[in-house]
Amino acid sequence: MPPFDAELETRLTRYAALDSQSDAASPSAPSTPIQWDILRLLADELTRIGAAEVQVTDYGTVLATIPGTAPGPTIGFLAHVDTAPQFNASGVKPRVIHGYNGGEITFPDAPGLVLSPSEFPYLATKQGHTIITASGTTLLGADDKAGVAIIMTAARHLLENPSIPHGPIRIAFTPDEEIGRGVDKRLPADLAADFAYTFDGGAVGEVEFESFSADGAVVTVTGVSIHPGAATGQMVNAITLASKIIAALPQSTMSPETTSGREGFIHATDMTGGSAEMKLHFILRDFEREGLAQKGEILQQVCAAVQAGEPRAKITCTITPQYRNMRYWLENDMTPVDLARTACARIGVTPVSVPIRGGTDGSRLTEMGVPCPNLFTGMQNIHGPLEWISVQDMAQATELCLALVQEAAQPGEDSRKAG
Ligand SMILES: [Zn+2]
């Protein structure tokens, strides 16, 4: 197999330099017009490498087909083009370090910022690799332009080598994953895949099929507004009541900063307003439906208790479902997960399945009927200035993609026995 390193390095640095941050406050789809630029560029590139049925949908997703060279299921591969809103993502200047020496990495645009292998042990295992970082003032956007580069490189390779046996492949590059709006309701039908994978995971070996189950909640506190000079016995301050709600929640046992592993949480993400009215936004997370429902009940009970203490106020709590643990669907048919694990073994990588403390486009897609586990890309320290990735890790992900489509077209002896 030819080395993909140079191509992956070129693709990632080129894609990362394009601004494509999403914006949860925008109602449009995609949420930011700059995402159209990278979507159209990727569509052009897919056409140029010979992909079929290249299309940019009006909901901002690039779709394409690599026609099958052998019988087999239709497999989809997805990556998202948007970068996270949590950190500066404009004017990314990717920086390439060839033959990483295993030491501390400093940043040209941020003196004092250090990426240290002692702090991030995964980096310590990458001596000799080609490492890509940003320049210190932005994130890199390997999340998820690494996924885009991996899928593009695998697609180019398959289209140039039609002797490689594989079934039909569908490609989708989506917008707005970081704000939870990457999967339009038309995508499952338009993708038309039997099952799919996102390339949006971290360390080499990750084959993920469990995500959080997620709800959002909005609490509105309406007080009694009156001039403070005439407020005696009259004013009900919404800020005071909102503070009581926050203080009454189990912060020390059920917040993101005090939970890990399979524990869920209640997280206040945003609080706006004034003494007349306050709006509090929460995200509720758990791996199980029961745990998620329990977190909703805790929030409702806290609101009810504060309401009971001040009947003149009006407190409402509205909980909205966001996405569900993809395991609920995948555990009924583990074929896509087993296939990815077998393909890992084929390229000498040990598969690891850890529950994702978050969601992916695959969570929604799975719920909508297209089973969609998440595969590694190599990306590390995402959503911040210390984001980095090893090109050799990306090359292993590319090889995984190629092994996977061949394994699906021609089941090996081992997977037949295991199945
Ligand atoms: Zn991502």
Image (spheres, rainbow, N blue to C red):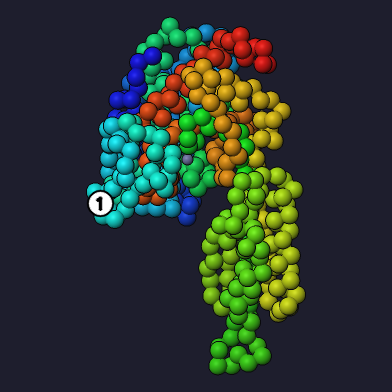
Q: Is residue 12 left or right of residue 378?
A: left
Q: Quadrant of the C terminus?
A: top right
Q: Residue at x 41, y 30 (%)?
A: 393
Q: Is residue 284 left or right of residue 182?
A: right
Q: Residue 168: horizontal and vertical position, in percent?
A: 52, 16
Query: Residue at image x 28%, y 32%?
Result: 99
Task: Specify the farthest residue to the left.
Answer: 108
Res 18 seen here: no
Residue that badge 1 annotates: 109
User: Would you say the beta carbon of the disc 1 residue lies within 8 angstroms of ligand 1?
Assistant: no
User: Residue at the location (45% across, 9% down)?
Assistant: 164
Quadrant containing the N terminus is top left
How crowded is the residue under tag 1: few (<14 C-alpha within 10 Å), some, or many (20+)? few
Among the 4 quarters of the image, the one containing residue 334: top right
The answer to which of 290 and 224 lies nearer the viewer is: 290
Mark 1 is on which residue type?
Asp
